[in-house]
Image (tube, grey):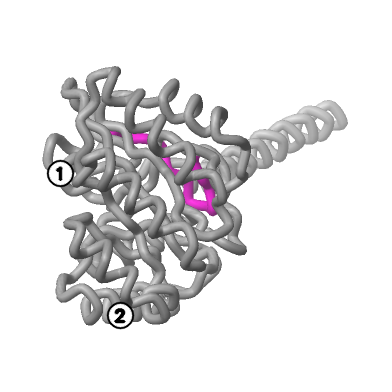
């Protein structure tokens, strides 16, 4: 009888261990669900680059404050005869600088949204995300006469909810494969080298035209010349997307960013 109880106790302990392990495994699976790649036909995704064999590249410029940098950058693009680029504009900045928005539009450059408030959208509720996107949409549509359908989230921050809300509103979320780090003011040569060494066919390059980025307009002429010498043609993000479907990179269900965070205070 005693041996029976000893044997049963061991079995009970073993059962408990197995049960605990099963619970732990289930917990890990649940946590890791947030790390599942969202690039599928059923789920919206962010676009970092476009797979193509053609030497096409999209220069993109974010603007959320200031008025000193856009004009020099537009002048460089004009002087270098780059007639295709994409500008992501925040709506508060656009409302206070309508003349610059008009200059960008009249130059023929593509205009996308950079949202409304410069906050991390992954921290907002679904309804707040919707409000931020639609508010910016209304402002940019009124100023440009064209409804934007591309958006780069403030700080490049998003999660699956943000992607879904943006998609429901008819937007494609645009990230980047090459971060110039011009927002860190790392020096003209460093900015040029980062872009030209990392560039690849189908690349989307992150640049800025906000006043906090003091070296972009100085680095831009060299970037353009070097990329052209490598055989690249400049296109808008929309033209790049039309080449192929988005390159599937993993997006995690968190405020996960590629190539680092932008400075939330001034980008």
Residue at the image point whose x is 48% and y is 51% from the top: 253
Q: Nearer the viewer, residue 150 or 123?
A: 150
Quick check: 182 left or right of 247? Answer: right
Residue at the image point whose x is 59% and y is 38% from the top: 25
Residue at the image point whose x is 33% and y is 51% from the top: 75
Q: Is residue 182 above or below residue 151?
A: above
Which numbered disc covers residue 139?
2
Dot 1 corresponds to which residue? Answer: 239
- Farthest residue in the top direction? 230
Query: How many residues crowd mark 2 within 10 Å: few (<14), some (14–19), many (20+)?
Result: some
Q: Nearer the viewer, residue 70 or 162?
A: 70
Q: Quadrant of residue 15?
A: top right
Quarter holding the N terminus? top right
Count of numbered marks = 2
Q: Position of residue 251 (x, y in %)?
A: 43, 43
Magenta residues (range): 247-258
Q: Is residue 255 magenta?
A: yes
Q: Quadrant of residue 91?
A: bottom left
- Farthest residue in the left direction? 242
- Farthest residue in the front direction? 79
Q: Position of residue 190 (x, y in %)?
A: 56, 29
Q: Position of residue 183 (x, y in %)?
A: 56, 48
Q: Nearer the viewer, residue 41 or 172?
A: 172
Q: Quadrant of residue 209?
A: bottom left
Residue 254 seen in the current view? yes
| SS state under label 2 | helix
Residue at the image point whose x is 42% and y is 80% from the top: 96
């Amino acid at each position: 009888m005693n041996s029976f109880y000893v044997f049963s106790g061991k079995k009970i302990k073993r059962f408990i261990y197995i049960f605990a392990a099963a619970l732990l495994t289930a917990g890990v699976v649940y946590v890791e669900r947030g790390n599942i790649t969202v690039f599928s036909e059923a789920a919206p995704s962010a676009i970092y680059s476009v797979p193509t064999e053609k030497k096409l590249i999209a220069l993109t410029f974010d603007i959320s404050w200031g008025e000193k940098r856009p004009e020099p950058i537009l002048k460089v693009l004009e002087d270098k005869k780059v007639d295709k680029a994409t500008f992501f504009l925040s709506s508060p900045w656009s409302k206070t600088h309508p003349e610059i928005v008009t200059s960008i539009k009249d130059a023929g450059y593509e205009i996308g949204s950079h949202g409304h408030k410069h906050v991390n959208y992954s921290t907002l509720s679904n309804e707040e995300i919707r409000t931020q996107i639609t508010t910016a949409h209304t402002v940019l549509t009124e100023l440009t006469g064209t409804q934007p359908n591309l958006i780069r989230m403030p700080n490049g921050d998003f999660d699956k909810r943000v992607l879904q809300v943006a998609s429901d509103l008819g937007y494609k979320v645009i990230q980047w494969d090459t971060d110039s780090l011009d927002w860190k003011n790392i020096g003209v040569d460093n900015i040029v080298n980062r872009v030209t060494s990392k560039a690849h066919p189908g690349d989307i390059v992150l640049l800025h035209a906000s006043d906090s980025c003091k070296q972009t307009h100085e680095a831009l002429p060299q970037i353009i010349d070097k990329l052209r010498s490598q055989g690249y043609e400049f296109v808008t993000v929309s033209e790049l997307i039309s080449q192929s479907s988005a390159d599937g990179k993993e997006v995690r269900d968190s405020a996960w960013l590629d190539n680092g965070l932008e400075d939330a205070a001034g980008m």
